[in-house]
Image: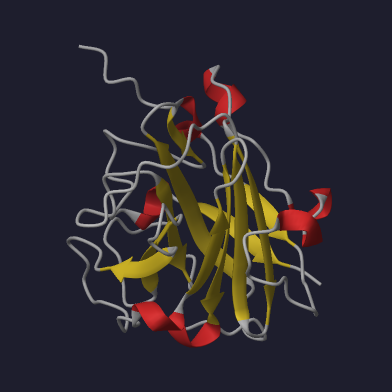
Amino acid sequence: MNLEISKRVFFSFAWQCPYREVPPTIDGDLKDWNGSFKMPDLMALDGREAFSDVYAAWNERGLYFAVHVRKAAGANVDRRRPLQGDGMQIWVDTRNVRNVHRASRYCHHFYFLPGTGRLKSRGGQKRIRRARAHSRQCESSELQVASDTSGTGYRLEAHLPAKALTGFDPEENRLLGFTYLLQDRRQGRQFWSADEPLPVSYDPSLWGTIELVK
């Protein structure tokens, strides 16, 4: 039986996430992002091609992300089941504990959906299955997200504010557990550290690390 487990699970990944004193404007226009904020493409390690550029940055107010999904013929979003349709999911552990298989209250799971038609972009938080304890659940209104679906593909920007990240304290700890998943019904799944059938959605030992650097 071929489980198609990614080769990436046999490695530990870390990336230095740049500091931005002036945060990007969350408007779906990626003109204020450049290559210094671009996360490394790890899909090639499995002989696969990435369909999106992914950018990240931080400051004392939280974390910032941007994606440019190429080639997509519009976004196919499932508003009733937001984890099933097109969009981005992000997992963050503000303690970066690498040797446990169940999430703590410092672990978070967020999702961001591009706007489609008259529906605006949307963000939200999901409880992590089998967690030993849960982080404070933030309201969707606390998460900033915007997208631009004009032209080829779509562009999306998001801000995770510090108050939505239990334990976020860059002065004390600059190593965060992290992974992401981009879903596109036409192009498949793009992920950073691991993917199904492994339990990456609730096992923080399968996530990578980002280091908040100035």
135 to the left or right of 213: left
Q: What residue appears at the point 17 percent right and 61 percent down from the top-left corner?
A: 130
Residue 52 percent location from the top left of the image: 59, 38
Residue 21 percent location from the top left of the image: 80, 79
53 to the left or right of 77: right
Residue 78 percent location from the top left of the image: 27, 49
Residue 182 percent location from the top left of the image: 45, 43
138 to the left or right of 95: left
Q: What residue appears at the point 30 percent right and 35 percent down from the top-left corner?
A: 196
For the residue pair 29 and 134, the one nearer the viewer reads as: 29
Q: Quadrant of residue 57?
A: bottom right
Q: Work out which quarter of the rendered image holds the C terminus and state it.
A: bottom right
For the residue pair 65 and 72, the one nearer the viewer reads as: 72
Q: Quadrant of residue 90?
A: bottom left
Q: Work out which quarter of the rendered image holds the N terminus and state it.
A: top left
Asked if residue 45 shows in the view, the reply is yes
Above or below, 192 relative to 163: above
Asked if residue 108 shows in the view, the reply is no
